[in-house]
Image: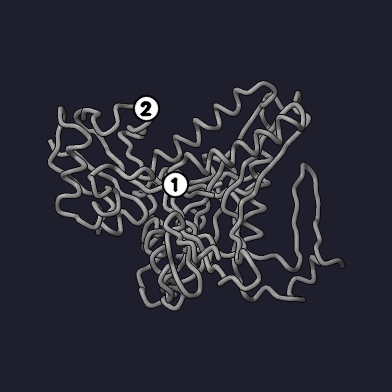
Amino acid sequence: MPTEWKLFADLAERAGDKQVTVDASAGDTVDDALSELVADRPAVGDRVLTDDGDLRSQINVMRNGTNVLVEEDGLETVLEEGDELALFPPVSGG
Amino acid sequence: MHVLGILGRGVDETTLDGVVDRAVDELAQDGRVGVIRYDATIADGTHETLTIGGDVTYGLGADGDWTATGTGLSVQDAIDQLATNCDYGVVVGVPSLQRRYPTLIVGSDADTDRAESNDRAHSLDHAQNTLATIDSPTDLDTLALTTALESTEPHRTLESLVSEVKHSPQAPRAGAIATFTGRVRQKDTEDDTPTEYLEFEKYEGVADERMAALESELEAREGVFAVELYHRTGVVEDGEDIVFVVVLAGHREEAFRTVEDGINRLKDEVPLFKKEVTIEDEFWVHEQSKSHHE
């Protein structure tokens, strides 16, 4: 079962698409889905990961509208079937 | 209020009028409908019979029925005025509005109005804002017009939000309304490169959920009775309003405090992304390098 990433702002521009389906399914972690996402898209990886491969501090990751870094187990959060993941830079409304 | 533009593309006036009548009838089943017709032949002096002097004249009758004539009203002014007491606003014959509002195209003569879509941002929005393309009034039978329109972004103004909170069941206990309006700033300093427009991208679904949750949280405060948050998406041009926060409260202290917290939290928490387009450059605001500030 594939998982869908939604990308916003410059991240979507770097990926060339606002939606990317990756090969990660229930039981895998958010980190697995992120690795799949950046594997073929180095421009996205450069933007969201540090040289050590950690997520940059200003990048947000949501799972079904919930911030996994604040309210769940971060990148170790385990995926459930049909999850929608989102990756975005700092929000800038107003 | 939801705004519906209607534009004719190479069809006769009878067909266009038929579509407008039918659309208005359909929307009227679910709410109050305002109609704005653009007609360039309306000009000084052509409506003398109604005007008895004054720049604006209201003729008032029984039960609040009225007619009006006047000068100096733009299409956007008219839409904004309808927004305080109509559920739907139908605007006929104003191609430039397709940038901003869902539009019903009648006929398929693609060359008409092409001149409107010259620049990059506007041509993009143009395509997105076509609700449907139809040929005749009967085509509306198969189009769930009201449902389709309801699924689009509503049009709200500061006045319409203020009017909404005044109708709160708790309004009798409220002695204060405080508001915040965020608008497009053309320049930070006198010699700053002028901003042409901002373009907001929204995390569809999640942004609205977050704003609704923020409203409920603020409304749960002691002495706060109603909170309305509204943020535009898409292209917002220089000088236009972007965001409103409206708070109905018992007293001014909690009204002011809640307005400030409301806009701060909206800016920190709601997944909205701002691209700034100046006459020289375009960039996502969060990526803005130091040089843009200097």
Pinpoint residue B25: horizontal percent, then vertical percent.
Answer: 52, 48
Identify the residue at image location x=60%, y=60%. B240
Host chain of mark 1: A
Residue type for callout 2: Glu
The residue to which callout 1 is attached is A91
Residue sitting at x 29%, y 42% = A55
| Residue B74 placement (x, y as % from top left) | 66, 65
Q: Quadrant of residue B123?
A: bottom left
Provide residue B181's location: percent of width, then percent of height: 64, 49
Q: Is residue B230 above or below residue A30?
A: below
> Label 2 belongs to which residue?
A71
Q: Nearer the viewer, residue B144 or A46?
A: A46
Query: Toward the viewer: B122 or B48?
Result: B122
Is A34 displayed left or right of B72 in the figure? left
The residue lying toward the viewer, choosing from B133 and A58, is A58
- Taking the spot 59% from the left edge, 56% from the top edge, the residue there is B35
Amino acid type shown at disc 1:
Val
Question: Label 2 is found on which chain of the structure?
Answer: A
Q: Is residue A34 left or right of residue B32?
A: left
Q: Secondary structure at mark 1?
A: loop
Please give the name of the residue rendered at 28% of the width and 52% of the height, measured from the top-left corner: A18
For the residues marked 1 and 2, what is the alpha-carbon distance in whole angstroms? 17 Å
Residue B130: x, y in percent?
Answer: 39, 59
| Horizontal side, residue B77 vs residue B58: left or right | left
Residue B6 in view in this figure: no
Residue at the right extreme? B53
Say if mark 1 contacts mark 2, CB within 8 Å.
no
